[in-house]
Image (spheres, rainbow, N blue to C red):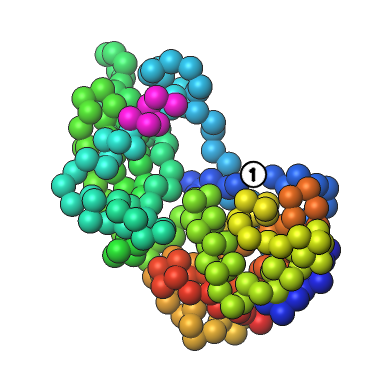
């Protein structure tokens, strides 16, 4: 493990960024009391890669996943929502096969439906839409606040971008240079994973993070590609406020 430098004193249904390339586990937490490395988000059944449409309870195919997300983004007003980097449209989190309605499938195949989850950074809302893949219609829409599913890889990458752009990212860059002899300039030079930062699991939460849970906040674990761990677990990113805060 590399040194901690000045800024990194040790550092969804979710989707992770993949496993580490090198053997070993992340170091013990150096951040808030009781903090531990974020566990990999729970895995979900992989999509069926072939065919335009699945059958019965088969996992959604690649074509169905793409169609479901497109359909879920069609209702009016969707473009006014924001994703993790501030772009137009909500941040996609996950798409899963929805259960049939009561009575469906008794006399014939039940319609194939998908439940698509987004996060709207403009309103800090979880948006869930159920789309009927047979009819192409959005059948149900749900909006919740204060609900934080596991982070999507795109959110984790944006969090790492914010760390590297922050003064608190200085230590991360120093650790990378110590480990490789090279400058750290892009997120592509690091392996990273992480998940939502949940304040109820922490002690001595800084005031700047008091809105996490209402805001979308994440904690990362990082390492040099095929190399040493760079501990970033004491750097919490509030993606809603676009700020980086040190804990511990």
As helix, strand or loop, the secondary structure at mark 1 comes to: loop
In the depicted structure, whether residue 195 falls above or below residue 61: below
Task: Quadrant for the C terminus, please.
Answer: bottom right
Q: Position of residue 85 (x, y in %)?
A: 41, 59
Left or right, residue 184 beside residue 210: right
Residue 25 is one of the magenta-drawn residues: no
Residue sitting at x 40%, y 31%: 65
Residue sitting at x 33%, y 30%: 67
Left or right, residue 34 beside residue 242: right
**Total label count?**
1
Can the viewer see residue 99?
Answer: no
Q: Position of residue 159 (x, y in %)?
A: 53, 62
Left or right, residue 111 beside residue 146: left
Q: Position of residue 197 (x, y in %)?
A: 54, 67
Instruction: Kindly give the residue lying farthest to the left in the view shown.
Output: 76
Left or right, residue 87 beside residue 44: left
| Mark 1 nearby-residue class (10 Å; few <14, some 14–19, many ≥20) | few
In the depicted structure, whether residue 201 falls above or below residue 92: below
Residue sitting at x 57%, y 61%: 160
User: Mark 1 sits on what residue?
Assistant: 18
Instruction: Kindly give the residue lying farthest to the front in the view shown.
Output: 182
Q: For this rendering, which residue is in front, 138 or 156?
A: 156
In the depicted structure, whether residue 49 falls above or below residue 207: above
Residue 195, quarter of the rendered image: bottom right
Q: Magenta part of the protein: which range? A: 62-67
Can the viewer see residue 130?
Answer: yes
Q: For this rendering, which residue is in front, 14 or 244?
A: 244
Task: Quadrant for the N terminus, please.
Answer: bottom right
Residue sitting at x 83%, y 48%: 23
């Amino acid at each position: 493990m590399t040194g901690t430098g000045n800024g990194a004193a040790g550092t969804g249904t979710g989707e992770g960024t993949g496993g580490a390339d090198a053997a070993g586990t992340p170091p013990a937490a150096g951040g808030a009391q009781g903090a531990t490395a974020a566990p990999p988000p729970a895995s979900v059944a992989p999509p069926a890669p072939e065919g335009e449409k699945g059958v019965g309870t088969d996992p959604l195919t690649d074509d169905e996943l793409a169609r479901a997300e497109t359909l879920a983004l069609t209702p009016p007003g969707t473009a006014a929502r924001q994703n993790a980097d501030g772009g137009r449209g909500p941040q996609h989190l996950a798409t899963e096969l929805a259960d049939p309605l009561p009575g469906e499938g008794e006399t014939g195949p039940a319609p194939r439906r998908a439940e698509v989850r987004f996060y709207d950074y403009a309103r800090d809302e979880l948006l869930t839409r159920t789309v009927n893949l047979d009819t192409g219609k959005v059948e149900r829409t749900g909006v919740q606040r204060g609900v934080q599913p596991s982070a999507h890889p795109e959110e984790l990458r944006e969090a790492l971008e914010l760390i590297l752009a922050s003064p608190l990212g200085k230590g991360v860059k120093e650790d990378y240079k110590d480990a490789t002899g090279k400058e750290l300039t892009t997120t592509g030079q690091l392996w990273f994973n992480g998940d939502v930062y949940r304040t109820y699991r922490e002690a001595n939460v800084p005031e700047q993070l008091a809105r996490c849970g209402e805001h979308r906040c994440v904690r990362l674990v990082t390492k040099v590609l095929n190399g040493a761990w760079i501990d970033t677990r004491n750097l919490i990113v509030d993606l809603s406020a676009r700020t980086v805060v040190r804990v511990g």
